[in-house]
Image: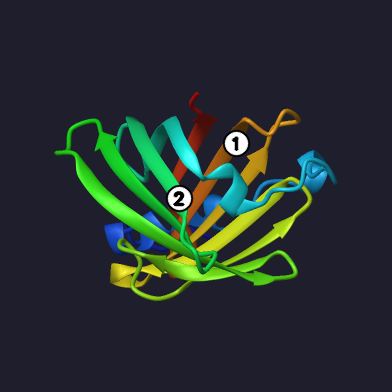
Amino acid sequence: MKQRMIPVPRLTTFVAVPLALLPCACAGGPSTASIAVQPAFVAERFFAGRLDGTGVLKIAFRAPVRTHVASVGRVAPDGTLILDQHIEQQGKPPRDRQWRIVPLGHRRYTGTLTDASGPVTGEAVGNRLHLAFRMRGGMMVDQWLTLSPDARVAQNRLIVRKLGMTVATLGETIRILP
């Protein structure tokens, strides 16, 4: 008896791209292993003043690029944190953006970001601050900042998702400048 071969269609880019990203889509935020009770992450305290951030941005199907963010933060009389940032990203012209973060009490925050297409929400748990917002193009951003024991450095882990799949990540170290 002769076996018949059943033709298997080739994967198109439409199918291959989501399948390639599938392992990333299951990745949640950073593990909770590094959460400590102290020092407490208070956004308006950490981001008030001058800060310097350096990191690596990884966008799906592209080479990683270096980033540098110079920030100056201040707290307005009403308690709103205003954070002005100058962003330099390898291969792109520099740009500026602004965060306005309002403490709501009970370690919760709301606010705006010039890059966001909707409100920013935030919550601090121990030494970790989680921020979330939507960007143009239907992308969702989750950002976890973890404060060092001396409260002078924060590790920033940012994840960008579209249709539930991870399309970009940023790992950044943010330091308070003297």
Residue 26 in sight from this viewpoint: no
Q: For the point 54% across and 58% down, which residue is it?
A: 25
Where is 20 relative to 175, above or below? below
The residue sitting at 34% across, 62% down in the picture is 9
**Residue 30 versus residue 54: which sits nearer the camera?**
54
**At x 76% / y 30%, what residue is drawn?**
149
Residue drawn at point x = 50 percent, y = 23 percent: 178
Q: Position of residue 146 (x, y in %)?
A: 66, 42
Question: Between 101 and 80, which is closer to the camera in this rendering?
Answer: 80
Q: Quadrant of residue 145?
A: top right
- Towards the viewer: 96 or 58: 96
* Three-letter code for the amino acid on which mark 1 is drawn: Ala
Residue 117 position within the rendered picture, expressed as x and y whole percent measured from the top left:
33, 73
Return the x and y of residue 155 as percentages of the image width and height.
Answer: 59, 36
- Asked if 62 appears above or below 109 in the picture, the reply is above
Label 2: few (<14), some or many (≥20) within 10 Å?
some
Q: Which residue is mark 1?
A: 154
**Horizontal relation, residue 45 to residue 168: left or right:** right
Q: Gap between marks 2 and 1, in whole Å?
A: 18 Å
Q: Amino acid at mark 2?
A: Arg
The coloring applied to the image is rainbow
Q: Residue furthest front?
A: 77
Which numbered tag is attached to residue 74?
Answer: 2
